[in-house]
Image (cartoon, rainbow, N blue to C red):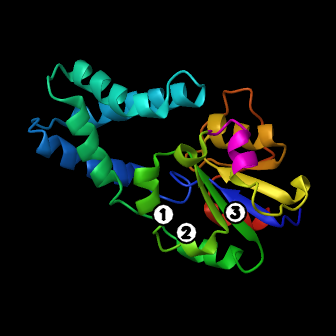
Amino acid sequence: MNYKMIIFDADDTLFDFSKTEEFAFHKAMKESEIPFKDEYLKIYKEINIAIWQEFEKGLITQKELKIDRVQRFFKAINVQRDAYSFSESFLTHLAQGSFLFDGVKELIQDLAKTHRLVLVTNGLKRVQNIRIVKSVIASYFEKIIISDEIGYAKPNPMIFIKGLEDIELPAKDKILMIGDGLGSDILGGINFGIDTLWYNPLELPNTKDINPTYEISSLKEIHNYK
């Protein structure tokens, strides 16, 4: 296989976004003076996942996403609050959460010795520029590409084309895309014309017509495909 460049997704691949999201959600709920119920976080996460899927399909803009997801959440729990204020509070606290999965720092340090590393994330620049660009692993990446800065998001291949246009790339058969999202990371890599490795820690069934080159359930297995 002998890849020369590895492109990583960020959230839920290297970074524990669920932990970050829960931290920010509790802070925003408290600041908006909304009595917390256990089911509220689950409701918000379901709405957030759905709206990001809409964004990846081009059905909603990133600017609209920030407010619409909060408005949908408030409607679902029958609460009247200012959606903009809640969104601002949530994003501020979200930017503070830079939690890596166990073993990620060591993995990236090791891979950086033999491979060129790039990180491509669908996200908001005001959040990702703090929690990812200033993370302890940021210096190991040749490029950190954020959809909100580029104007394109995975699975659109333009995020790779535009984001990587200022560096010399190896042949595409020497580039590997690694991520947890079939509809964003893997499809994005396929659309760009490179091999893909689906990180599937929960060993979920692949119910989509998207076929990764490889599949792993543990990040330690990356060494078998590099």
Looking at numbered disc 3 in the image, what kind of residue is underneath it? Answer: Glu
> Is any part of residue 147 visible from this angle?
yes
Relative height, residue 82 to residue 6 (above, below): above
Magenta-colored span: 152-162
Q: Position of residue 172 (x, y in %)?
A: 88, 53
Residue 18 appears left or right of 40: right
Q: Give the answer, above or below, for where 37 lies relative to 149.
A: above
Q: Count neighbours of disc 3 (C-alpha within 10 A) and say few if under 14, some if 14 to 19, many if 20 or more.
A: few
Where disc 2 sits, the SS reads: helix
| Mark 2: amino acid | Val
Say which quadrant the C terminus sits in: bottom right
Q: Which picture quadrant has residue 72?
A: top left
- Mark 3 and mark 1 residues within 8 Å of each other at the beta carbon: no
Q: Residue at x 28, y 24 (%)?
A: 71
Task: Indicate which disc residue 101 carries.
Answer: 1
Report the residue at 59% width, 40% height from top. 151
Q: Is residue 120 left or right of residue 53?
A: right
Q: Write down the residue under mark 2.
A: 104
Give the alpha-carbon distance from disc 3 to disc 1, as whole Å.
15 Å
Note whether 166 is above or below 65 in the view shown. Answer: below
The answer to whether residue 157 is magenta is yes
Residue hosting label 3: 221
The answer to which of 17 and 96 lies nearer the viewer is: 96
The reply to whether the C-beta atoms of the residues labelled 3 and 2 are less than 8 Å apart is no
